Amino acid sequence: LSKDRRNGVDQFLLRTSRGASALVSLHGGQVLSWKTDRGEELLFTSSKAIFKPPHPLRGGIPICFPQFGNRGSLEQHGFARNKIWRVDDTPPPMNRNESSDNACVDLLLRPSEDDLKLWPHSFEFRLRVSLSTDGGLTLTSRIRNINCKPFSFSFAYHTYFLVSDISEVRVEGLETLDYLDNLCQKERFTEQGDALTFESEVSRVYLGSTGTVAVFDHERKRTILIQKEGLPDVVVWNPWEKKSKTIVDLGDEEYRQMICVDGAAIEKPITLKPGEEWTGRLELSSVPSS
Ligand code: TA6
């Protein structure tokens, strides 16, 4: 684990002995880069990304909490991604599935006075980012209610994968699921059984996904496998050409090199009673494919 600073914000580089790496910033607790042991980047970051908190950072894995999108009274995707997190001095113990050989960093977010004015619920949000010896990336979020009243939230790991060409990408594992289409007033549809391919703007929330979701990048001959716990929904987003032009921190043509596929909990918000804790885990791995 090594540390450096960018724009006055600390960031941490996790590395395996074989050379895989992940870069994690205190800005948003955001993973900014994830590379294979051959040095190939797997996450997209916009060339126009603004590295100045509290501006959210376009790329990597922004954490949407305590609200996903505009489904509530808070700013888009909640405030967690805009905050400066701190290193957690009292991290949770390793669980049985975690190896002490993993490279990891533990971060903590507590609400500021200003956050409490907007969202009057005290919480502790502990994030562990862990890189296993085989290069797999795991993000574990533990959110605890330290208030005297229950609260509810929605959540997403808004993961921007880097792809060679969006037209050559296929997403599998969502066939037959119901989804809410953000482009049609969040109307509910059912996926008709084919893998997803992309030829126009897509903004959907797939519901009740239990299995592995796979992102095939035909041109790069690479597949990303997404597994998750505590995260029943999967967001799929690509802004395509027209929408991209309205997003200031995204290049006009960059939509071709990205696809967001998020492990999330959106349709049924998570409710925590005082003292309760929720865990949401995302496990990403990359495998060569033909
Ligand atoms: O479905 C994902 C989404 O909510 C889209 O509507 C789009 O706006 C995207 O997130 C990115 O949001 P951002 O606030 O980062 O521009």
Image (tube, rainbow, N blue to C red):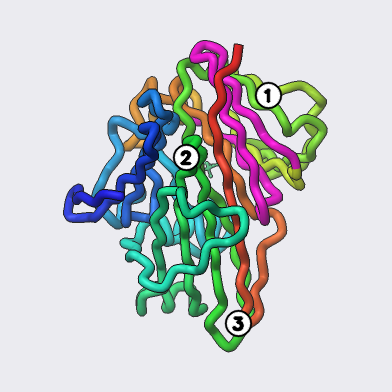
Which amino acid lies under the numbered mark 3 shown in the image of this protein? Answer: Gly
Whole-percent x, y for residue 81 in the image: 41, 55
Question: Residue placed at 32% from the left, 55% from the top?
Answer: 27
Whichever of callouts 1 and 2 sits on the residue coming sooner in the sequence is: 2
State how far apart marks 3 and 2 are (Cα): 34 Å
User: Mark 2 Cα within 10 Å, few/some/many (few <14, many 20+)?
Assistant: some
Q: Are marks 3 and 2 in contact (CB under 8 Å)?
A: no
The magenta stretch is: 211-239
Whole-percent x, y for residue 171 in the image: 65, 26
- Mark 3 lies on a secondary structure that is loop
Residue 226 shown in magenta: yes
Which amino acid lies under the numbered mark 1 shown in the image of this protein? Answer: Leu
According to the image, label 2 marks what residue? 133
- 1 or 2: mark nearer the eye: 2
According to the image, label 3 marks what residue? 275
User: Mark 3 Cα within 10 Å, few/some/many (few <14, many 20+)?
Assistant: few
State how far apart marks 1 and 2 are (Cα): 31 Å
Q: Is most of the magenta stretch helix, strand or loop?
A: strand
Which amino acid lies under the numbered mark 2 shown in the image of this protein? Answer: Thr
Question: Residue placed at 59% from the left, 65% from the top?
Answer: 153
- Mark 2 lies on a secondary structure that is loop
According to the image, label 1 marks what residue? 196
Whichever of callouts 3 and 1 sits on the residue coming sooner in the sequence is: 1
Q: Is 164 located above or below residue 130 in the figure?
A: above
